Amino acid sequence: MRGKHFAALKFLLLPALFFGAGFAAAEDAAAPAPDRPAAVLVFDASKSMGDKLGETAKLDVALSALTEAIPGQANQLSLGLVAFGHRKDSNCADSEILAKTGELNGGSFAKLLGGIKATGQAPIAAAIGDASSLASDGKPLDVVLIADGSDTCDADLCVTAEALKQKTKGLRIHVVGLGDKPTDLQPLACIAKATGGKFVTADNESDFKTGLGAVFAAITAPPTPAPPMAEADAPPPPPGPGYSADQTKPGETAVLKSGAPKRDAPQAQAERVVPVSPAPPKTQPLRPVPVSFKALITEGGAKLQSGLIWRVYSAKAKSDGGFELISTHREPTPTAALLPGEYLVNAAYGLSNLTRKIKVEGGKSLEETFVLNTGGLAMRALLATGEECPKGSVRFDIMSDEQDQFGNRETILADAQPHRVIRLNAGAYHLRSLYGDANASVGVDVTVEPGRITEATIKHTGAKITFRLVQSLGGEALANTKWTILTSAGDTVKSNAGALPTHILAAGSYAVVADHDGQSYTRKFSIEPGNDKQIEVAIEDGPTSPEALNALLDPPEAPPPGTGGLAGEGPGGAMGFDGFSARPADPNAPLLNPGTLFRPSTP
């Protein structure tokens, strides 16, 4: 059973009925021969037609029957051909006029549909609209729809058929449904009912040929003469004496006279006074408008041909602040049938996107162009030696350039992989790259330019460190050991358990605590950029005292720079000329304004 691909609102897909291609096709259509009625075949080549009825695909069943029928019918009818769902996997505008009326015969049919395959969606409403556009002015047209189910583009087939019939009075649409599930075919019945056509179904090749023959017989049959009027249906006799031909206006009182008044009757008895209520105003139904979309990478740049997702929302916010999704389109240049009103349209190309409000007015087709200003970002990470970081050891987070009052940034894409082009809106971003699973992290600011690929290369200076608890230096690593790696400020970098834990750490000063058999053993160490090594903790050095362990886990805070007042004053008089402490700063102390290190100075 065919699935639905759009939500919240049914559309009338009638671009060929109201605008553009429909009028052009109607003007260019070859006029059928005067002695042959005009008929157009509408052929379903959507993906579901590849499903089998018994041992044969539905597409092949239909093609076989038509191959037999077309040569004979082309001698009696001026035939045309429309196919849908035959070109693209997912395109709700995939309807094509293959032959105008008078151009289809046995030879051309084989050429047009000989290599056709069951491929994509089933835009039936668009296809019967294209077929109806081939009608010649004032002449009847029969359309024969061959399909195995309803419209998969969420069009309202019943209302579409009614609108087509209203525009083309001589239109009849016959339906030959092919399938073994009646529930799939039943939605097509209203098309025939609304236009006065026949509706037949078949679940095998024999019944399909019979049903197709019955439809062609109905088309070629001479019109049934109108039955004679019964006496009750005959027009009324001419009005008698005293009849007034004045038309009554809404809101006035009509005086209806049945004849001259009798002489012996009062004048009032010769009249019937009937109040006439004003007729309610006629409201014209809103008709859908075809709205086409296309997207450019940059202003004046190339039109995007793939990778786009279009979403159409109602512009009126719901009670929860969100917006109702009207439809989703994955074609690069889709056409949506929208009722007059305001909409929010979002075009997404990777992480690059643009949302605009559009206004659809009745009777005016619309084409909207979205300039996305998309750029590409490709990232790579190198070791201190200049070599590529091992595969799978590096991750990137793409974050917003702006920070809140707490220094936090919005994450746009987490865990981005290197060597892949990521599509983004042009602008400034902050990249955070983590090498390993500890603290070897590097942050940089980048600018993505529209229409270009920006390559960001980050150099990591972290080192791979392996920890071992041994009885004595150079001995065998002991299992059942719990490890805690600390910065010189007492912050925990990583905790782990095992005989040989390995982590990548940023350059700096550290301490490690190894817990084994109820005792804690510690060691301080430092890491130089890119210098991989092993850190051994020896049990023979003895366990760490509780006081020393507490000093590692919770060291006293260092006095902030500038403590001590004026220059030259303070404890020990060890002050620099600028009033700050002359003692070397702790490289692991928190920065007062870390953001200043990540932005280049303005020349």
Image: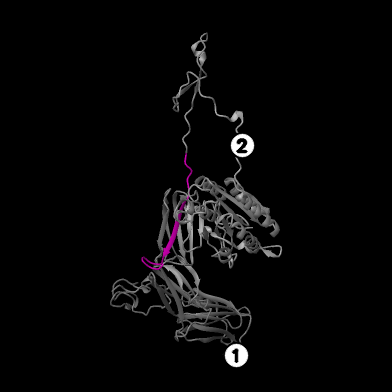
Residue shown at 36%/66% (left/top)? 300
Nearer the observer, 112 or 126: 112
Which quadrant, please, contains the N terminus?
Answer: bottom right
Q: Quadrant of residue 146?
A: bottom right
For residue 227, the mark is 2
CB atoms of marks 2 and 1 within 8 Å: no
Which quadrant, please, contains the C terminus?
Answer: bottom left
> For the residue carrying disc 1, how many other residues have a C-alpha within 10 Å: few (<14), some (14-19), or many (20+)?
few
Q: List x then y, in percent, for residue 17.
A: 48, 51
Counting residues from the N terminus, which is met first, the one under dot 2 or under dot 1? 2
Magenta span includes 291: yes
- Identify the magenta region: 283-302
- Type of residue at label 1? Gly
Q: Secondary structure at mark 2?
A: loop
Residue furthest out toward the front? 35
User: Does residue 401 sit above or below 392 in this rendering?
Assistant: above
Q: Is residue 587 left or right of residue 54?
A: left
Residue furthest out toward the bottom? 474
**Residue 141 visible, this angle:** yes
Nearer the observer, 102 or 517: 102
Q: Which residue is mark 1?
A: 475
User: Does residue 258 sit above or below 598 in this rendering?
Assistant: above
- Type of residue at label 2? Pro
User: Does residue 472 sit above or below 594 in this rendering?
Assistant: below
